[in-house]
Image (spheres, grey):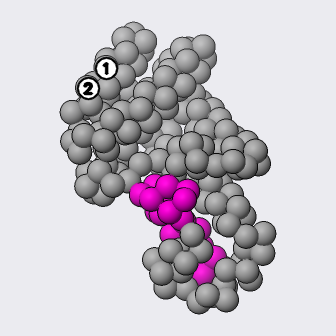
Amino acid sequence: MATDVRTRMVDGAIRLLATRGLAGTSFSSVIDLTETPRGSIYHHFPGGKDELVAAAIDRSAENAVTLLDQRAGESAERVAELFLDSWRLLLTRSRFAAGCALVAVTVDTDSADLRARTAAAFRTWQDHLAALLTRGGLSTDDAARFATLLLAASEGAVLLSRATGDTAAFDAVAATLLAQVRAASR
């Protein structure tokens, strides 16, 4: 039961980071969202808010790897499609209210530890994407470059789509990225 409460709090923090940013992710908002007891805060996160945010960063990286593994062994194009489709789904299901929890922390934290942790999480995504793209038919060098491009371009496209409230920018970026991976796969 205690692990369940901690898990709910971490998952709640991810949702809040993605929609409200770091400043809008307080212990009170996590407790309200997850309907967990107030005493759970310091029981599960004695290091305070940074400990909760660090756990959310780590879980976000784990979630991305788990998602990407759904396409393990498939073509590089299919791997890229899944990655892009997951962002499109996040945008549309949230009515453009949610973005990347890691970006939210990166742009708003003053903590060198949290910034280093987000950098490590982004590296995990990039490395995992690159490995799957290589397995899907790209050369190791192309896969590494494309994983970086895929991550950076999709994050920017998510921001543009959130700002405009539609997927036009995201769809344009996604189409271009998929054409590039298709060309590199030949």
Going by the numbered disc 2, the residue's amino acid type is: Ala
Q: Residue 108: x percent and y percent?
A: 58, 47
* Residue 92 shown in magenta: no
Which of the 4 image quarters holds residue 120? top right
Q: State the quadrant of the N terminus.
A: bottom right
Magenta residues (range):
3-25
Q: Tell me which residue sits at (38%, 27%) in the image.
A: 77
At numbered mark 2, what does the secondary structure look like: helix, strand or loop? helix
What number is the disc on residue 3? none
Q: Which residue is mark 1?
A: 176
> Label 2: which residue?
172
Q: Is residue 34 left or right of residue 186?
A: right
Task: Tell me residue 51's x, y (percent).
Answer: 72, 64
Residue at left 64%, top 49%?
A: 109
The C terminus lies in which quarter of the figure?
A: top left
Helix, strand or loop for the magenta stretch, by majority: helix
- Rendering coords of residue 148 (x, y %): 54, 25
Percent position of residue 143, x then y: 54, 20
Whether 34 is drawn above or below 83: the answer is below
For the point 66% across and 84% down, the residue is 40
Up-down relation of residue 36 to residue 23 (above or below): below
